Image (spheres, helix red, strand yellow):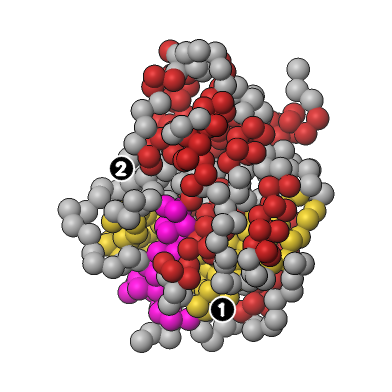
Amino acid sequence: MRCHRALGGRAAAAFAAAAALALTMSSGVTAASADQPHIRQQPTGLAAGNGDVLSSESSVFYLDPLKAIKVKATAHRIMYRTTDRTGKAIAVTGTVLDPAASPHGQRPIVAFAPGTQGLADTCAPSRQLAEGTEYEALPIKKLLDQGYAVVVTDYQGLGTPGVHTYMDREAQGRAVLDSIRAAQRLGAVDLPDAGPVALYGYSQGGGATASAAELAPAYAPELKIKGAVVGAPPADMNKVADSMDGSAYGAFFNYALSGLATSYGINIDPYLNAHGKRVTNDLRDNLCTTQALAKYPFLNSRFLTVDGRPLTERLKRAPWDRIVADQQLGMRKPATPVLLSHSALDDVVPQQVGKDLAAAWCRRGATVRFAGNHIPGHIAATAATSADGLPWLADRFAGKTAPTTC
């Protein structure tokens, strides 16, 4: 074993932030460069175990699209086995990052679950890390700066064939857990194959991390998970969809519709008018998050449908009511301590959604610390999750008793 996310108020600020990001970052990752990895095709056969590495290649991690700032870490893009919502074996990609130096004897591994990236293959974090266009690059680097190895999943269908199953609770949680197994088994890096690990994510990543924490006791009981940092989790899709549709982040609701339709085998074309089909296809095939928010601000689904009714109404009718219920977080107890960070001024996922999740976990006997803050806007509040999460993680890896607000 080796020891090895005329305008007014917060919505205007959110749109301005997204537009600024779209202008300052590259307009999208559209072509492979010398630094960009090329793993994409599904293998003809899959390995026997979840988390098994199917292929790997050297990669690189830049903080900027000019590629002037290269992070001091070895990077490997990997393809590994996981399972989809139905239990079918699939291949997904990701990136394993190993810091140049670490004060830890047995180096911890943190599974970083990415926030909303988009649906197009070019939006995969493993590609954007290599191009310097990953908007979550700083929180990833901060984890590396602590001496932790970091593995970043691309999730199902993001960077591999098929539509990304955005907001699919089980597929996302499994991809996160199996990314840790893959990092432990990657022969190109010397990481502990049975050492301490942790989970970290914000927004979509917060939901994926929460799901992973809930699934771990049955799906990956061998992993020594010391804690989970969960930021602004979209734990209740009905409440989150009502908040997003027509907002500055309306594209996110469209992502969810496409992703869950793919996961559950539903054709959404009959719901959509010609404009709706064009927008949906554009979001699915061409645009990453920052470009989507800039191109389609305040996207309201009622303008996309054949009958002029918002798609949120469909979520309350079969088969969507059952699909939405399947994504509910808080129905299972995490076996690991959780830090749940959420801003009262979040303009995408209402803070009450996070509070409700924390309360549900507390009722089930989990150890949860709810950390509220008042940072304005969903995007900016990522900083609070990082500020609270890093020292909290350090304490978990040091074996200190986890605090609770239950």
Q: Main secondary structure of the magenta part?
A: helix
**Residue indicated by mark 2:** 161
Residue at image position (52%, 57%) is: 211
**Mark sitting earlier along the chain (2/1):** 1
Q: Amino acid at mark 2?
A: Pro
Examine the rendered structure and indicate whether residue 342 appears above or below residue 362.
Answer: above
Examine the rendered structure and indicate whether residue 357 appears above or below residue 273.
Answer: below
Tell me the tag on residue 102: 1
Q: Nearer the viewer, residue 62 or 260?
A: 260
Give how far across and how far down residue 358 sits, in percent: 69, 59
Q: Are marks 2 and 1 in contact (CB under 8 Å)?
A: no
Give how far across and how far down residue 123 sits, in percent: 45, 42
Q: Determine the image quadrant of residue 21.
A: top right
Q: Amino acid at mark 1?
A: Ser
Q: Is residue 280 visible?
A: yes
Callout 1: SS: loop
